[in-house]
Image (spheres, helix red, strand yellow):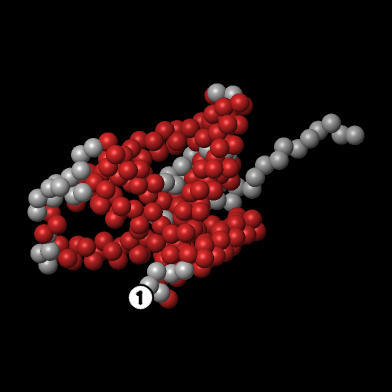
Amino acid sequence: MDDKTEKLNLKREVGLVGAVSLIGGTMIGSGIFMSPQTVLTTIGSPGASLVVWACCGFLVILVSFCYVELGTVIRESGGEYIYILRTAGPVVAFVLIFTSVLFVRPAGVAGIALSFAQYVVAPFYSDCPPPVLLVKCVAAAAILVLATVNCLNVRFSMSVQVFFMVAKVLALAFIIIGGVVMLIKGHTENFEDSFQNTNVGINPIGIAFYQGLWSYDGWNNLNYVTEELKRPEVS
């Protein structure tokens, strides 16, 4: 028997475009289209809402820099699991992955899928709320389809990711251009006394930051597939 064993390695099929699409396509998800109204109603004013969004973005940028450094030093897939495994040991890493797999990730995927399903069925129920069962069925179907796509082929899943990222970027560009046009036309009434009626308290500020940070979620996804990147130092 040959004592030499080959190490199992993942195929490096994710390039720079796929890596950017993985991060951008995940971050530009249902949260960015649904959280703004929650942030605004919770914090109470447009000015404070913009401050919350800016602070959330700044925090995400700082943490992203940390993950960039970790990803180039520890070139293994797994994200925070592999980092904690290498620094704090297997027990803490197991607790992290146990809670993440059973509770955190499924809850996040379910929330995103339900938000997606509401947008999909909304055009068919313009006069009334869509049936809850229908929304759940569409969400479940979306999860199954995407899971199947990711299991079949990495390149195909990256193509799907790029397609949806482009579609969501175009949708955001349309919204941004529409807002700029409204400002040019003089519709600036929402910026007059923009900090009036701001809810200053731990509860509203905490909820607003939670919603804002949830919308930015996805910035760390690239570190889960480090071993599948063609050139990790570039991506």
Q: Going by the image, does 82 lie left or right of 183?
A: right
Residue found at the far right of this picture: 1
Q: Going by the image, does 157 lie left or right of 220?
A: right
Q: Which residue is mark 1?
A: 127
Residue 231 appears at what percent x and percent y?
53, 43
Nearest the eye: 82 or 69: 82
Give the secondary structure at mark 1. loop
Residue 61 appears at what percent x and percent y?
35, 40
Quadrant in which residue 4 is drawn: top right
At a point 39% along the width and 62% down the height, the residue shown is: 168
Is there any visible trace of residue 104 in the rendered image? yes
Q: Going by the image, does 24 lie left or right of 156?
A: left
Residue 82 appears at what percent x and percent y?
57, 33
Q: Going by the image, does 25 lie left or right of 141?
A: left
At a point 38% along the width and 72% down the height, the residue shown is: 128
Residue found at the far top of this picture: 88
At a point 51% along the width and 52% down the height, the residue shown is: 109
Disc 1 marks a residue whose amino acid type is: Asp
Image quarter where the N terminus lies is top right
At a point 55% along the width and 23% down the height, the residue shown is: 88
Query: Compared with residue 179, is residue 10 higher up or lower down, i.e. above or below?
Result: above
Mark 1: few/some/many CA within 10 Å (<14, 14-19, 20+): few
Is there any visible trace of residue 55 in the rendered image? no
Residue 160 appears at what percent x and percent y?
52, 62
Nearest the eye: 56 or 117: 117
